[in-house]
Image (cartoon, helix red, strand yellow):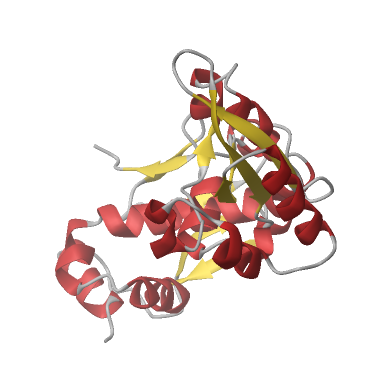
Amino acid sequence: MILLPLTLAAVTAGCSTFSDSDVVARVDDVELTSDELDARLTELGVTDTDVVQLEPVRAELTRWIQQQLVPDDEIAATYDARPVDAGAVCTGVIVVADEAAANAALAALESGTAFADVFQSDNLDPSLTATNGIIRCLLQEDLDTGAGTPFIDAMATLSADEPYRAVPVLDDAGAEVAWVVVRFRPWAELESAESGQVAGLVDVAEVAGDADVYVASRYGTFDVETGTVVSLG
């Protein structure tokens, strides 16, 4: 499916004709061509109808520009070293009955046993079965809201260098009802939606102000304050 010819026909009526090699965005000396944008949109499953609306195009241009300003390898390094600095932490959890069981599971993980194997043998929470213990990434606002809860506080201390914690689960009265073993999931293991979520948390305003960022006017303009491509209207 070729998207850009239809896009250009729709949004440049009455304007001069653009070739497939036109630059649609640039950050300093790095350029994004129409063909490259077309390929990115196709990979995302964006339809011709979506493209005419331009919002998916602006979103992908934003993503590309942000990748140039703050490359994924820099985000990955920050996330692995100290997830809270990246704004999110992604984990897997195993719920067990008590501290002894938690310590046994923790020892198995630290000795090199795969998380999935320990989860299958030890987990007591059936609600986690469908995802094999993988839970949604917690954002900084989640960590702030839940601060003081052993599980949340443990999440905030994880990193690639210190990937495991075992903490009690408390009821509203503060009584221990179970234990949870938490494993940090490094950048290399994140799903594309998760890594994209983390990347989207990066504040690019500071670096954007020092960069030469160009966006073809038919798609909009780059707003330095928000770090996004917006309409000209």
Query: Seen from this angle, which residue lies furthest top?
Result: 173
Query: Residue 210 appears in which quarter of the rendering?
Result: top right
Estimate the x, y position of residue 177 in percent, counting from the top left. Answer: 52, 30
- Residue drawn 14% across the image and 68% down it: 49
Query: Residue 44 appears in which quarter of the rendering?
Result: bottom left
Estimate the x, y position of residue 60 in percent, counting from the top left. Answer: 41, 59
Query: Residue 45 appears in which quarter of the rendering?
Result: bottom left
Q: Can residue 26 be seen in this snapshot?
A: yes
Left or right, 107 with respect to 68, comes to: right
Left or right, 76 with respect to 47, comes to: right
- Residue drawn 33% across the image and 59% down it: 57
Q: Can residue 216 be seen in this snapshot?
A: no
Pick the residue in front: 182 or 17: 182
Estimate the x, y position of residue 9 in percent, counting from the top left. Answer: 18, 72
Pick the residue in front: 177 or 208: 177
Q: Quadrant of the C terminus?
A: top left
Q: Quadrant of the N terminus?
A: bottom left
Left or right, 59 with respect to 191, comes to: left
Estimate the x, y position of residue 25 in percent, counting from the top left. Answer: 49, 59
Image: 196 above or below 120? above
- Residue drawn 67% across the image and 55% down it: 71
- Residue drawn 59% across the image and 55% down it: 67
How many labels were placed on the picture?
0
Pick the residue in front: 174 or 40: 174
